[in-house]
Image (tube, coloured by chain):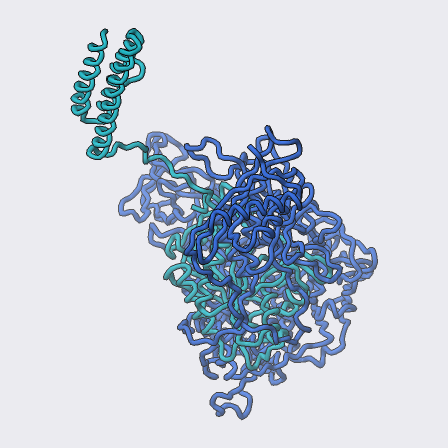
Chain colours: A blue, B cyan
Amino acid sequence: MNASYAWLKTFVDFDLEPNALRDLLTQRVVTVDEVLPLRPDLAPIVIGRVVECARHPDSDHLSVTKVDAGTGELLDVVCGAPNVRAGKFYPFAPVGTTMPGGMRIERRKIRGAVSAGMLCSARELGLGDEHEGIMELDIEATPGTRFLDVYPVGDTRLVLDVSPSRPDLLSHLGVAREIAAALGKDIRPLIWTGAHDFLGAPSPEQESMTRRLLDELPTAIAGERFDATAIAEAVTTVVGDESGVAASLIDAVRSMPDRPRHKGVTEGNTGNVRVVLEDAEGAPRYCGVVIRGVKIAPSPQWLVDRITSVGGRPINNVVDATNFMLHGFGQPMHAFDVDKLAGSSVIVRRARPGERLVTLDGVERTLNPSTTVIADAERAQALAGIMGGRDSEVTETTTDIFLEVANFDPRATRAARRALGLSTDASYRFERGVDIEWAPFWLSHAVALITSLAGGSAEEDVDLYPEPRTPAPLKLRVARIAQLLGAPITAQETLSLLRAIGFVVEWVPGTEMLHGDQELHVIPPSWRLDIGHEVDLIEEVARLHGYDAFSSELRPFRIGTVPDAPIELVASRLRSVLANAGLYEVRPMPFVSGGEGYVRVRNPLAENEAFLRRAVMESLARRAEHNLSHMQGNIRLFEIGNVFSPSGGRLPHEEVRVGALIMGARRPPHFTEPKPPAFDEWDAKAIAEVIGETAFRGRSFTLVPGEGDTLWEAQLDGRRVGDVTRVRLDAPVWASPAFGIEVALETVASADVAAPGRAAYGREDAARGPAPVTPFRSLPVTPAAEFDLALLVPNDMPAAKVEEVIRRNAGELLERLALFDEFRGAGLPTGMRSVAWRLTFRHPERTLRDKEVSGRREKLLRALEEELGVRQRTA
Amino acid sequence: MTLDELVEAARSLAREGRDLIARASSGDELATARTTLVGRKSGRLTELMKALPALAPDARREAGAAVNRAKEALEAALDAREAELRHTAPAEPRLDLTMPARRTWRGAVHPVTRVIDEIRDIFRELGFTVAVGPEAETEWYNFGALNFPVDHPAMDMHDTLYLSDDTLLRTHTSPVQVRTLQSYPPPVRVIVPGNVYRRDFFDPSHAPMFSQIEGLAVDEGIGFVDLKATLVNFANRFFGRRPTRFRPSYFPFTEPSAELDVQCGVCGGSGCPTCKQTGWVEILGSGMVHPAVLEACGVDSERYTGWAFGMGPARVALSRWGIPDIRLLYDSDVRFLEQLAQ
């Protein structure tokens, strides 16, 4: 929402500079994203007074002047304008100014006469097309004063980040209400707010009378205790009969509390136009009025300024007036050309199947039968709450208009807007909710505005509101405020805070004296569609009291019942272990090109990334390729992330996995070793083992040789949980082989915990026992005996099998068995390799005798020969 | 040369040699002496040996023994002097110690993870434990239980990637609030780190998946002042003692809602491009848990109250390291990761 600083000032009289206003709004009401001076280029321009003026000796059209620009000396300025006069004030651009057109003002000689600055025309300042002469200012100002300070083109735009819950802030009126409440000021009586742009400022007497009206209106809407006639008469007295505003206002005021008059009425006339509300669901209230004899013309400058100050584009007086009402008061309006409405009918109904409409933007749209349209006797003429139709658009030749001031249903508007893919200022507001009660008031306001701009006269208006709403009062417990905020706020303060922003607040009878148990009845104003619960009121109280006014001192708290998620602890350990092993953690996107067997995103960002990955390695492989494309061949990445696969149930099967990919040099190059070796299978196996030891302490994690590119399957307690693979990449020729490790850490529990509104307690509590540990064994006090076994092992016999035989036959004194060498090639029988182990024996109490050791060696060799046919390698 | 001459020559060589060796005052001089005396090619002892074959066999044996004695004596003297010199002379530098160390590869946890861990550690001290939940969620856990109005513009802030009519990729970590409150009775104090998804195209400031961390405290007697105190305490530790401010905001699942700003660390509050001239930088959203959310989780909202907050660690990482483009965090470029590991 764009708000104009100058426009806001017409609603409430405040002294804050734009930046101070920004801070006030941001802290109490709505965040101001930006403060944009609308004409910062005019900042250097000052007021100059021409003190002397004479003809240039060498020119018949130039003047040589002396200008007082507040610098303390008179400046020589050459001027070419015919209207330059001594004693007058003009905008003056001093030397060094860059003009809006880009020209830089320098000290220079013009036909021999020095000129130090420039007196400016409106066109030179970007303020219009007038360039016949310089801009004579009809003001008394001290020379040197900033032009922007005295001439009202220097408006500032505030860009507000209005949340979906506060549609009432989508107008200057709404923002001004909050400013007034924050500063303890009154908002100008609504009849004059904004309107004094075209009616002139009100007299104090007019102000006070109309302020009474303002004060009464919320109460009037809330209840039935409102004397409309008395107010109307008072207004007539002070405003006078000549003003169209008075009459319209009186009508509006009269209509407001008169719910019985509206109940069930869905048809009415304004002039000769028949208005029928068929779709009261899509349009809960529909007001309209015919204005005859308008003259369509460009808007006056003040209106053009208002429209452009919020980023709009001026069109003509009638259209600009409706936009003025939208931005000023939050009520979207639309003007139809009555002559284009067949049968002089306005029918609010659902679109017919296949019905078409060319909207104002020139696009022909086929309408959905659930869309509400404004139609004439024959066809749709506008999309309700979104955009008008081109055929009934107000043009230069229009003389009679039908002005629509309606309230359209938020959800219906939103559905239609989404279906059509068409968002407008109007739909934006209707989607969030427009105040339904004030529609006729804004109608009369708009009539006054349009007739003052474009002439013409209004017929009797029509106001169809078949199911008038009655706001439900909310109960607000003073004790509940203290409970929720943690600090008491008195009933009295609550009352005045809420009243200041238009809430009707009364004591609940009999609770006034119940200290601590006081209760208030609160009726939210009709524009506060976000207020539906007691807690919403408490937010208002907290916000208006000021968030910064609350204490920020820590108080004691109770320890919670929730244990740390086990996966979080495992993931933390893994991250530090893998980072210390030289790998970089990455956080890639989980979207893949996928296909059969993958979980699909229904509305993906791109069709080639429409699926969720089944494995972390899918992401890591793409990331490795990304690095290779940047000539980076040393790649060591890991990720702990989620993967998805179809489950047959409602939600996918989801797992947390750790994945790692390594390729390139095993260690950084060093001058002692010109080219470090590349990572191979054994490095990958080491990482897999480290992952297993870190993630599954005290459990059986094994790597079982696999087939093809699967080097090993990782098994946890005998169940497959991952693998170590050769990773096939789209890699350049210089790249080293890539290896991947991926292990599932946990299946994510995604079933519903309990039915909505229910809980299912009773899980294990926070106090879990310590993790299992391996107990300490005494350090050895006796010497070990060692020998090596170099065995001829068939190429297809796993070393693990040999080790198994060795362990089984070595006896319990075997302390350590370490494979330390493998040799293949020359000197060995075909199909055989040499594998060497070192065996370490130790007796816990005494030194082993040589004979005991050699006996074991012989026994082992016999067993290997008998069980496996494996013999010692002879040199 | 005769036998006698040769024997005499050997003796005198041994004598002269001892003097020469004794005079050597450095390793270099000693090495020169060694070459001169016993050098294999042209040492003086070698010269003597060349004369041996000319003698008769008996004389040759005797002369050979004499030459050998001289050789042993010289070598013993050389070795002794060398040991002496090594003891007394200062150690000569053999290594150029300015040359680089033999390192192993450096690795690192991701910058975003580091931010998450810091946040987590501060909240651990404030009594919070870590909770997690699924990334693929039901609409009820992601929206319904969190008081999102159906078909309302509030949903526009959560442009959602759907998996089916009523399942989706979670748009925030808040579903874990619901799962946790349904699983454990109050008091609850948890923080929830995790990945969340939005239907946002990749650009310098948006990613379709990003990390979030949120916190939740629910108990009897918890109020807005506790939210404020805890979050200000956190902000002071995490960002340093910079001024903070709370301002009104809107989230469907909290009421009242507030956003927390810290004073811009770049300009110190005077306004600069980083803070869009406001002097403040938004760091997190927060609020008192909406009673409707508590009720959806089976918690009595009249008895219990609570507060929650959420923040984006990636945004913190971007500003902390001055990273201009959020995509760098997800590209996994090893040059980027290595640089930030420093």
Q: Nearer the viewer, residue A778 or A700?
A: A778
Is B93 left or right of A837, judged from the image as shown? left
Q: Position of residue B215 (x, y in %)?
A: 52, 66
Residue A404 visible, this angle: yes
Residue at the image point whose x is 53% and y is 93% from the top: A510
Dividing the picture into quadrants, the one containing residue A74 is: top left
Please name the residue shown 62% across and 49% down the image.
Answer: A805
Residue A379, percent from left and from top: 81, 58
The answer to whether B301 is drawn above or below residue A170 in the figure is below
Nearer the observer, A55 or A45: A45
Answer above or below: position of A803 versus A474.
above
Q: Quadrant of the N terminus of chain A?
A: bottom right
Q: Which of A837 and A44 is in front in this view?
A: A837
Residue A524: quarter of image? bottom right
Return the residue nearer the eye: A45 or B118: B118
- Residue B277 on image: x %, y %: 43, 54
Q: How many numbered tags mark residues here?
A: 0
What quarter of the picture does the C terminus of chain A occupy? top right
Q: In this view, does B143 lie to the left or right of A45?
A: right
* B95 relative to B73, above or below: below
State left or right for residue A643 relative to residue A117.
right
Q: Position of residue B110 (x, y in %)?
A: 50, 50
Query: Residue B289, located in which quarter of the rendered image?
Result: bottom right
Residue at 59 percent across and 46 percent down: it is A860
Side (left or right) of A514 relative to A700? left
Q: Residue furthest front?
A: B58
Can I make out residue A231 in this image?
no
